Amino acid sequence: MISLEIAKSHLLVASFNLRICGRCIARVKRQIYYTVMFKLFGINIFARDEDTSIKNSLFESREELFEWTQNKARSLGYVIVTKRSKAYANNFVYNVVLMCDRGGEYKATNTVRASGTRKTNCKFELEGKYSKEHNKWTLRVICDDHNHPPAQHMEGHPFVRRLSVDETQLVEDLTRKNLPPRDILSTLKGQNENNVSVIQTIYNAQQKIRRQEQAGKTPMQVLMSILHTNNYLYEFTTGDSNELENLFFVHPTSWKIWRAFPHVLMIDATYKTNKYNKPLVEIVGVTSTRKTFSVGFAFIHREKETNYTWVLNCVKSILDKCMHPRVIITDRELALINACETVFPDATRQLCRWHIEQNILKISSKIITLDDDRNSFRILWNLLLGSPTLMAYTENYQRLQSMLIKYPRKLVY
């Protein structure tokens, strides 16, 4: 590739040593420019067609000029973006300046997070102008010098990772069919071998699609629309100011599985799942093959017995005439336990073994001070939980009692 700077230096030496006139120097400069255009971009300025219009250096539209420049630059390991443009009063763009995507300087912001930049203040620039004479676009090199080596891989350039209009439509269609983002990305790359998008590109496209769909709607309107459109079973209550207090919803598929396996329920509430700070109650069922599945979810106003009773009545109503649950497993939430006793009085209520174990380990870390004793306790406790028979359980419990003789408080707990 010819270097414009080297050519300029030869021209400067010639102008001093040979004392070339100014007109000759201008002619040589034009020759250097034409040579650079041909070497860098394959544009033959001197080639003319039968209509005496400049051939291969003119473009039908700004989009064609930009696409051609992008393809040429990308084949050489560079990415070209728009730096600025000028337009008439009718918004017709007549001038556009293109630059390397690593051009410009990084403007640091006041942030604690360590960040990097791809910018190297690259001076490479091109200028595209609309020619009224030919009703076409021309391309001119302002600076042909890159201050960085060409890229070996294009995945690090955000502009190249952008999706086309057709690709964006494909992402939208596949998203509506609930295809995972990784599979959507594989489909895009399968259809276009030059696609260099990454998984974050798919996430961003899906987020943009959701924003467009939710434009002008409140979060609650969006939620209720989703529940209604997807045929969820749902119930809700509102307060005096018509604000949502409790919301219960079940997916249609979960409802079918729940009616087939209503025997066991596991219920727990979690927090900090939404910006409204409403507790989320998750209801889980168990199949005959010991596989768990989500029955339903509920956002409640408060963790009071009345709220839990309302949720369990909703669960009971969707069962219709099916069998009621025989076993209900919860943590030691007294309001929830009382609500279960009210709505499902015939069900056996048990405490969740995982919650019991977490409380045991939490208390043991405070009472048992020696590390060896803590490890011994964990081993004996796991043996006790994994006892296959009543006899094995009794033996393991006696071992645990012997080990906790030094810690009577723990044994009483």
Image: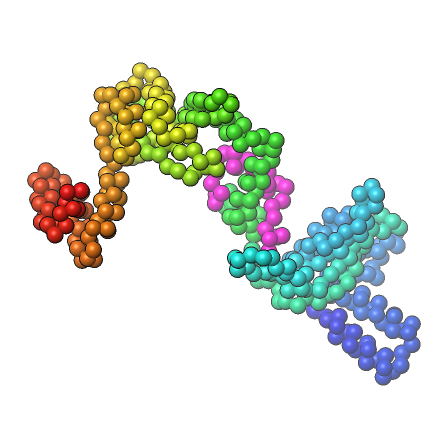
User: From this viewpoint, which residue is outermost toward the bottom?
Assistant: 17
The colour scheme applied to this rendered structure is rainbow
Q: Left of 256 or right of it: where is 91?
A: right
Q: Quadrant of the N terminus?
A: bottom right
Depth order, front residue of 66/396: 396
Residue 249 position (above or below residue 82): above
Identity of the residue drawn at 59% across and 42% down: 167
Q: Quadrant of residue 259?
A: top left
Question: In the image, which residues are magenta?
Answer: 157-183
Asked whether the viewer can see residue 256, the reply is no
Identity of the residue drawn at 48% across and 26% down: 244
Residue 63 position (above or below residue 353): below
Depth order, front residue of 88/349: 349
Q: Is residue 122 magenta?
A: no
Depth order, front residue of 337/17: 337
Asked whether the viewer can see residue 158, the reply is yes
Q: Quadrant of the C terminus?
A: top left
User: From this viewpoint, which residue is outermost toward the top?
Assistant: 321
Q: Is residue 172 magenta?
A: yes
Query: Residue 294: x percent and y percent?
Result: 36, 32
Query: Residue 164: x percent and y percent?
Result: 63, 44
Query: Residue 263: x percent and y percent?
Result: 26, 26
Q: Quadrant of residue 312?
A: top left
Residue 184 position (above or below residue 340): below
Identity of the residue drawn at 77% across and 47% down: 61
Depth order, front residue of 287/170: 287
Query: Residue 375: x percent and y percent?
Result: 19, 54
Q: How many marks?
A: 0
Q: Left of 383 or right of it: where is 289?
A: right
